[in-house]
């Protein structure tokens, strides 16, 4: 969580920083729950939420003029997609590790 707050502070535009701060305060708990429901792992969920905030800060202009409902929907989509991508990366790493273990046996 501390890294997310540090990331937010690096946003130079005051309006954009305020948007990301608002998203953090309103949706952080939801984002963690959403990511954890996909990843089934608290640490992976934290990584997914951090990556989601990186993407939000990179694309903050998409969020500036959204109302609360639209913001919630877009935050949900970002979080879901990042969590699924992380899940798939972890799954592929496990498969490669399993395959390398079988070859050595």
Image (cartoon, grey):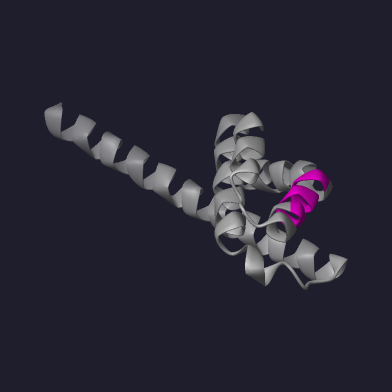
Q: Is residue 40 visible?
A: no
Quarter residue 65 falls in: bottom right
Q: Residue at x 20, y 35 (%)?
A: 100
Quarter residue 98 falls in: top left
Q: Residue furthest left?
A: 104
* Left or right of residue 34: residue 90: left
Residue 24 sits inside the magenta stretch: yes
**Please, what is the dominant secondary structure of the magenta stretch?**
helix
Quadrant where the C terminus is found in the figure: top left
| Front in this rendered view, residue 8 or 104 | 8
Give the answer, above or below, for where 37 lies relative to 84.
Answer: above
| Front in this rendered view, residue 34 or 16 | 16
Quarter residue 47 falls in: top right
Give the answer, above or below, for where 28 lies relative to 73.
Answer: above
* Left or right of residue 22: residue 5: left
Where is residue 17 drawn, in percent x and y? 70, 53
Q: Is residue 19 visible?
A: yes
Where is residue 78 drawn, in percent x and y? 62, 60
| Front in this rendered view, residue 34 or 97 | 34
| Front in this rendered view, residue 43 or 20 | 20
Where is residue 10 drawn, in percent x and y? 59, 44
Q: Residue at x 59, y 51 (%)?
A: 52
* Left or right of residue 76: residue 51: left
Quadrant where the N terminus is found in the figure: top right
Q: Residue furthest top?
A: 105
Residue interval drawn in magenta: 18-25
Give the answer, above or below, for where 68 lies relative to 83.
Answer: below
Residue 83 sits inside the magenta stretch: no
């Amino acid at each position: 969580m501390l890294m997310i707050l540090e990331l937010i502070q690096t946003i130079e535009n005051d309006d954009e920083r305020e948007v990301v701060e608002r998203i953090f305060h309103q949706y952080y708990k939801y984002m963690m729950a959403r990511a954890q429901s996909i990843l089934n792992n608290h640490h992976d969920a934290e990584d997914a939420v951090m990556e989601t905030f990186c993407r939000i800060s990179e694309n903050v202009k998409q969020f500036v003029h959204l109302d609360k409902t639209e913001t919630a929907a877009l935050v949900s989509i970002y979080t879901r997609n990042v969590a699924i991508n992380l899940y798939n990366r972890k799954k592929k790493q496990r498969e490669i590790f399993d395959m390398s273990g079988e070859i050595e046996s």
